[in-house]
């Protein structure tokens, strides 16, 4: 199979509409199970794509590169998760058409008939609905990834999820056949803006604001922070993160994070891995749906990312994020947090699995 071109090593490019299409597939499959607002009732400036539209967009935007292959494989796997209320063997027409789009996209990408792989009885709905969700996802993802020509095999996919009091808590753990050194920069949050510019516009070490930097309400304008050249790497990180896609018209959050970073190699003593942990120190400002700028916007934000050596050429990647949006307020707050309950797992799956392939 031909080698697919890549972006800069370890750099997750992608595009906003492709990520949004994956989000649509996941929301349609998850809203009933999680008790969220039905897709057609979400108070959004742009309607959420239907299941079939989301799949079609993934195929339309696909290029002959690793990231497009990953998007098709993720979409194919998402449509093979057991669905709330779906009897074994049942597949509604919209679901069937969405799968048809992705199968055609994989056919075009591989330049051959993908049916020999994708029609394996082990991928049949009866077989997958008898499996736990993560096992079904991994089996479908691995088959689609082989057709798409993704270069590195993923051998473990485990996740945990909760959504309580509008706080999303998601953890992902995967194994990939690559050495630990390949992930040294990927698990360094100081590299977020270079490795994932789609999501992070800025990420740099700084200092906690001084009292003089705050206005009468105690808030801080990010422009008052010490620039990265003026400080040594510290335990405080500034990030400007974007919730991408036209659904929310580019909502930005600018945060200060307390971070602990250990990415030094080679491993010594009892150390088995590298990574970081973080806890929000302050959400400085936010721009909601591209309108104006407000102070605050996120009141829960913590997690970690790590790479652990499980064998000389096998690495376990783990990521966890807990988050809750405090703005916008009012009726939109529920909608934003319900979207976050779906968007954050999609984003983490994308970031971690992209990291295994690039």
Image: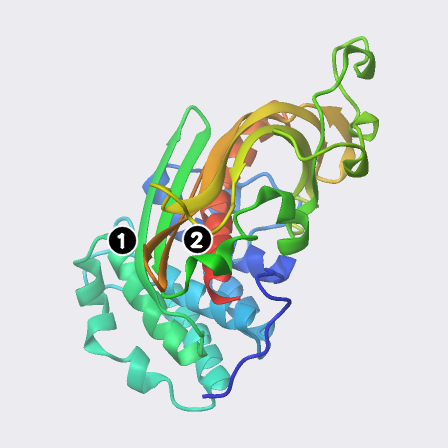
Q: Residue at x 24, y 63 (%)?
A: 90
Q: Name the residue nearer the viewer: 74 or 129.
A: 74
Q: Residues within 10 Å of mark 1 (few under 14, many from 20)?
A: some
Label 1: which residue? 133
Callout 2 secondary element: helix
Q: Residues within 10 Å of mark 2 (few under 14, many from 20)?
A: many
Numbered circle sitting on residue 6: none
Classify residue 173 as left or right of residue 349: left
Give the quarter of the image for residue 6. bottom right
Label 2: which residue? 26
Q: Quadrant of the N terminus?
A: bottom left
Q: Residue at x 44, y 79 (%)?
A: 149
Q: Cα distance, mark 2 to mark 1?
A: 13 Å
Looking at the picture, how far across and down is residue 255, in whole percent?
Answer: 66, 30
Above-or-below relation of 230 to 139: above
Q: Residue furthest bottom?
A: 112
């Amino acid at each position: 199979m031909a080698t697919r071109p890549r972006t800069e090593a370890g750099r997750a490019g992608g595009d906003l509409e492709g990520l949004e299409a994956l989000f649509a597939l996941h929301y349609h499959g998850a809203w009933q199970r999680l008790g969220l607002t039905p897709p057609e009732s979400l108070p959004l400036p742009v309607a959420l794509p239907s299941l079939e539209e989301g799949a079609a967009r993934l195929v339309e935007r696909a290029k002959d590169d690793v990231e497009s292959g990953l998007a098709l494989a993720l979409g194919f796997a998402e449509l093979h998760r057991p669905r709330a209320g779906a009897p074994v063997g049942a597949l509604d027409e919209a679901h069937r058409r969405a799968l048809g789009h992705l199968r055609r996209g994989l056919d075009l990408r591989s330049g051959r008939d993908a049916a020999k792989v994708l029609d394996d009885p082990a991928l049949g709905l009866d077989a997958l609905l008898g499996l736990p969700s993560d096992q079904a996802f991994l089996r479908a993802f691995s088959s689609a990834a082989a057709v798409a020509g993704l270069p590195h095999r993923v051998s473990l996919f485990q996740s945990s999820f909760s959504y309580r009091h509008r706080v999303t808590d998601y953890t992902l753990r995967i194994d990939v056949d690559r050495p630990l050194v390949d992930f040294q920069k990927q698990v360094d949050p100081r590299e977020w803006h270079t490795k994932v510019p789609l999501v992070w516009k800025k990420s740099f070490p700084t200092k906690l604001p001084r009292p003089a930097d705050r206005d009468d309400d105690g808030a801080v304008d990010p422009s008052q922070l010490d620039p990265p050249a003026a400080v040594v790497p510290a335990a405080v990180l500034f990030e400007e993160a974007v919730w991408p896609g036209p659904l929310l018209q580019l909502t930005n959050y600018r945060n200060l994070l307390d971070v602990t970073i250990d990415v030094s190699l080679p491993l010594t003593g009892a150390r088995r891995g590298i990574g970081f942990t973080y806890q929000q120190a302050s959400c400085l400002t936010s721009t909601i749906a591209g309108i104006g700028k407000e102070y605050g916007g996120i009141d829960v934000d913590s997690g970690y990312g790590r790479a652990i050596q499980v064998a000389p050429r096998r690495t376990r990647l783990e990521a966890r994020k807990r988050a809750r949006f405090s703005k916008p307020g009012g009726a939109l707050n529920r909608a934003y947090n319900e979207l976050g309950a779906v968007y954050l797992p999609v984003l983490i799956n994308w970031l971690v699995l992209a990291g295994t392939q690039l």
